[in-house]
Image (cartoon, helix red, strand yellow):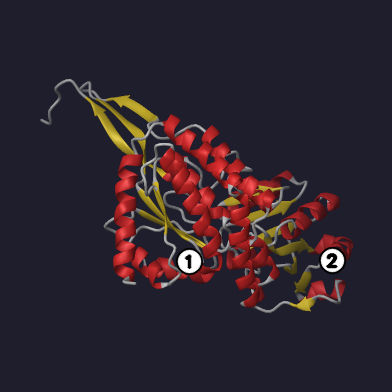
Amino acid sequence: MDIKHYVTDKTKKAKQASRLLANVSTEIKNNALFKMAAGLEKDMDRLITENRKDLDEGGKKGLSAAMLDRLKLTPERIKAMADGLREVAALPDPVGDVIKMWRRPNGMQVGRIRVPIGLIGIIYESRPNVTADSAALCLKSGNGVLLRGGSEAVHSNTAIAAILNRAGTEAGIPDGSVTFIDNPDRACVMEMLKANHSVDLIIPRGGEGLIKMVTENSTIPVIKHDKGMCHTYVDCAADPTMAEDICFNAKVQRPGTCNAMETMLVHKDLSSSFLPAMAAKFKKAGVELRGCPRTKVLVPDAKEATDKDWDTEYNDMILNVKVVEGIDDAMAHIARHGSQHSEAIVTRDYETAMRFLREVDASGVFVNASTRLNDGFEFGLGAEIGISTTRIHARGPMGLEELTSTKFIVFGNGQIRK
């Protein structure tokens, strides 16, 4: 197969569909989303069969348990995907919203209106639910979507995308609005990154290597969804029970996600009373601890943390632990090793909490809450395209509004430039 011709053909057809989709009514888009949701549920057995092929191949390749969990489709997860589509249908359509209007001294009215970005290319790894979430958000915001999932989920993603495109077309959505690159050859990604004749924005979702490769090779604007080096700082003024619950949730609830905690920082004055019990709870759950020298004194069976560990996103049941002098030490560690994704503090001290909120640089900063809550659904945005660690033009969970741009609109009655 001629890879260049294959990708060019896909992108051009998707671009043509995106131009038509930009003017499709909210009613048609919502109806399409409902039909897509029903299609996923109707073909559940087929999806699980195709997913089993990916799981079997992943097992042979030695994927970790956490990675296989991210890859796995169950009836409950397929139902959740379908519910996510319905939830997006229930959200307000941002396309056509007039953000602001003002009148100039010459009587001319100037305003800004929300419009789709165009054709969005999404390059992602592992989780098949990204296929449905991305398609739903792009469709509702009037954008065409060009999807390229990881080779480890090619069977699952191909099946999901086919169901979505067929259901959408039947509902009146332009054919090709949801386009999937089903060739697992990595050369397809490189061609996709050069397709600036058709693709308006690239959004990579995956590990550090994928993000680096995309940003270094793309000739198209990129919004990064970078690695999640997330920290929780347990302050000396923390409620110990609350801190235990938050830290346990942030690491154990689903360790393979980008907003899972990778490092727990504990104030030295609380460490002796907090760390042994917290470590025992983690150990019982199967979490491997890697700690600084002061941590190892309190938790002797913890492994010694290396310099590399503080910068590693494990996506697994492994946690770094460091005893710090106080909030300044904690924030300095976050500044050195964080990825500006999700950072949390547990404290009952208002001034300390407000300092953390003001001074920590991240897409989401949490006081007395788990980093796992940095999520579009939890924020009330509906399903998200991902969590942007970029500053332009969107940061944090990207919902419908973040998938639009704006254009100026002008109303005059004969005004000319003098």
Q: Is residue 219 visible?
A: no
Residue 93 falls left or right of residue 23: right
- Seen from the viewer's position, the closer of residues 57 and 203 is 57
Residue 307 in the image: above or below residue 17: below
- The crowd level at tag 2 (other Cα within 10 Å; few <14, some 14-19, many 20+) is many
Q: Quadrant of residue 203?
A: bottom left
Q: Residue at x 29, y 66 (%)?
A: 5
Q: Is residue 136 visible?
A: yes
User: Which type of secondary structure does the marked residue at label 1 adopt?
Assistant: helix
Give the image location of residue 263, x and y in percent: 70, 65
Residue at image mark 2: 279
Give the image location of residue 266, x and y in percent: 77, 62
Q: Nearer the viewer, mark 2 or mark 1?
A: 1
Give the image location of residue 262, x and y in percent: 68, 65
Q: Residue at x 34, y 70 (%)?
A: 3
Residue 94 falls left or right of residue 242: left
Label 2 sits on what residue type?
Ala
Residue 203 falls left or right of residue 15: right
Residue at image mark 1: 211
Residue 359 in the image: above or below residue 169: below
